[in-house]
Amino acid sequence: MKTLIAYFSVGGRTKKVANAIKKVTEGELFEVVPVEPYSEGDIKWMNPLARCNKEKIGKKDVPVAGKIENFEAYDTVYIGFPIWYYGAPNVINTFCKDYDWTGKKVYLFATSGGSEIGKTAEKLQPYIKGAKIIDAKVITGKDELLAWIGSHN
């Protein structure tokens, strides 16, 4: 059984969670990086002209730098991201569309300044056709993370 932890992080919180999951699962990390990195201004959601708003409203693909080699070798995939507009950032959707998810077990983990996981899993499902989302959770602390991962093993 091979595990992948794919994550997108802007401020570093999601990266910390991904690294903690790696330690527990002994999985492999893949950072989802947009071809054009986000600046501080790009993620200021209070500004209607910010890049994050234009992408979400316009349902735009956000090209991803890099590719996972031998994706078919993984049977379990953790996908992590900050919650943006009650779902995954568009860069995660674009990332997911690039792979065949058939038969994979998927766990979604998110970081957030206050949003719940809501319908994030339902919104992401069309991008990971053939996969089964086992669980989805906003992670707020280390103890919560360990309990969540422990409940899957």
Image (cartoon, helix red, strand yellow):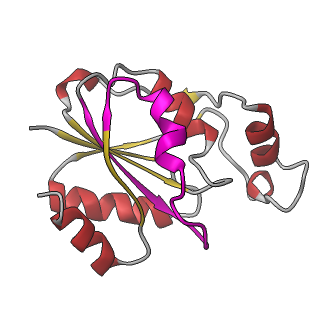
**For this view, does 75 lie left or right of residue 100?**
left
Q: Position of residue 125 (x, y in %)?
A: 46, 34
Q: Position of residue 134 (x, y in %)?
A: 28, 47
**Can see residue 70?**
no
Picture quadrant of residue 54:
top right
Q: Is residue 129 above or below residue 19?
A: above
Q: Position of residue 86 (x, y in %)?
A: 63, 54
Q: Is residue 118 above or below residue 67?
A: below
Is residue 128 magenta-colored? Answer: yes
Is residue 74 magenta-colored? Answer: no
Q: Residue at the location (69% across, 48% down)?
A: 38
Q: Residue at the location (23% across, 26% down)?
A: 103
Q: Is residue 27 above or below residue 113?
A: above
Picture quadrant of residue 151:
bottom left
Q: Residue at the location (89% across, 58% down)?
A: 47
Nearest the eye: 143 or 36: 143
Nearest the eye: 42 or 60: 60
**Can see residue 1?**
yes
**Which stretch is magenta?**
104-132
